Amino acid sequence: MLHAKLTAGLIGIAALLTSTTATFAATEITFWHAMGAELGKKLEQIVDGYNKSQSTYHVTPVFKGTYPEAMNGAIAAFRAHQQPDIVQVFEVGTGTMMAAKGAVYPVYQLMKDTGNEWDTKQFLPAVVGYYTDTDGNMLSFPFNSSTPILYYNKDEFQKAGLDPNTPPKTWEDLVTDSNKLMSSGAAKCGFTSGWITWIQTENFSAWHNVPIGTEQNGFGGLDAELKLNGPVQVRHWGNLKKWSDAGIFEYGGPVGGNDAPPKFYSGECAIYMNSSGSRAAVLMNSKFNVGFGFLPYYGDVKGAPQNTIIGGATLWVLQGHTPEEYKGVADFFKYLSTPAVQADWHQFSGYLPITQAAYELGQQQGYYAKNPGSDVAIKEITLNPPTENSKGLRFGNYSQIRDIEDEEFQNLLSGKKTAQQALDSVVQRGDDLLRQFQSANQ
């Protein structure tokens, strides 16, 4: 009897040890990201869903602050041989990541090396084109791609005698609507905007089909120069200054414009331009009926509106890990690109569905019919086939160039410079950074 009990006990211990060993046998994948607040929570849910879907790999998401902080932190970690498997990098970091020789494991190569079929045709062309090389090879995984759209307060439109179902189409319409909103007392200001750089300069340029830089906005080579000081851009910056002085436009601050959202949520400004990825936050924080529309354009500019360009970020794979880890990364990417996961992420966040299948699933589910305006970003970015002026941008050191844009825009608002002077300075100072990047990476 004692022998039987002892044997049974040993078997039980062995089973427990086997179970514990199996639990810890999962290959660990480290994923650094820059998603905070509600988007961060949703990202963690998605990762948790992947971890529960299989037991071979375990992905650990680690929040690393802002997009620039996550990118710079990963580069520093690589030099110290402590890099993660995956890092989330914002779209304007693409040129910098491509130039980080020996640090990046291109996604197309990862999929090939791990024996996975990977058809880039499954992704929306407007999304995948930004993150491919000149041969059409995908360099990073486009997990969260967005484009800027217009949000507006339908209740305040109605109070001002405007049609709550008709957002302004042109900048001329927007100014007229803003004056009515303000004179009626419905709103204190007409509009505010996040990202003067991304929305009111870069996307503005693409939307009006004018160049951001030479060499196909930097896609064609490291010798590109900025072209942000053309007549259309100067006109718009000049108008933003004029509208700011008149109280029609309220500046939301540098970088992402973090002061802009509260101005809209509170009802202070009736119109707000920001990322489609802000949709979840807008709906959560607004105590009024929200409308959605295309970005405005100048009605007399030939070729406008063209198409908007993407923002958001992609997932880059870093070198220096084991083959088994890379198999796990590839498996995780396949999970992230499934229609169900992508449709859920898109519908929650407002980011674009990165695949045609995810978009079609949303249509089948009746999501767009039940949520008017939820497909504005998709329609906007696919409005016309991209031109050399509207397929995006790819410049080195561009995060620093955006800082220059913010500095010069504030010089404009304070009256220290005219729009022409401010944008000329952006180009001059920005080109200096481009030449430094070119020198370091040729």
Image (spheres, rainbow, N blue to C red):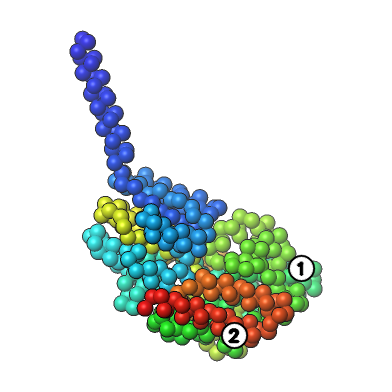
- Which x, y percent locates residue 248? 73, 74
Crowd around label 2: few <14 · some 14–19 · many ≥20 (10 Å): some
- Which x, y percent locates residue 156? 72, 66
- In the picture, the disc for residue 424 is 2
Q: Residue at x 38, y 75 (%)?
A: 441
Q: Which residue is situated farthest in the top direction here?
A: 1
The quarter of the picture where residue 9 lies is top left
Query: Which is nearer the eye, 347 or 238?
Result: 238
- Three-letter amino acid code at the position of disc 1: Lys
**Location of the N terminus (image quadrant):** top left
Give the CA separation, mark 1 to mark 2: 33 Å
Query: As displayed, is residue 357 above or below residue 409?
Result: above
The answer to whether 369 appears left or right of 421 in the picture is left
The answer to whether 83 appears left or right of 158 in the picture is left
- Three-letter amino acid code at the position of disc 2: Asp
Of the residues tagged 1 and 2, which is closer to the observer? 2
Q: Is mark 2 on a helix, strand or loop?
A: helix
- Which x, y percent locates residue 65? 52, 56
The residue labelled by disc 1 is 188
The answer, for residue 337, to whether it is visible in the render is: no
Query: Which is nearer the eye, 72 or 85?
Result: 72
Q: What element carries label 1?
A: loop
The answer to whether 99 appears left or right of 279 in the picture is left
Query: As displayed, is residue 61 above or below residue 263?
Result: above
Q: Residue at x 44, y 80 (%)?
A: 218
Q: Residue at x 46, y 56 (%)?
A: 33
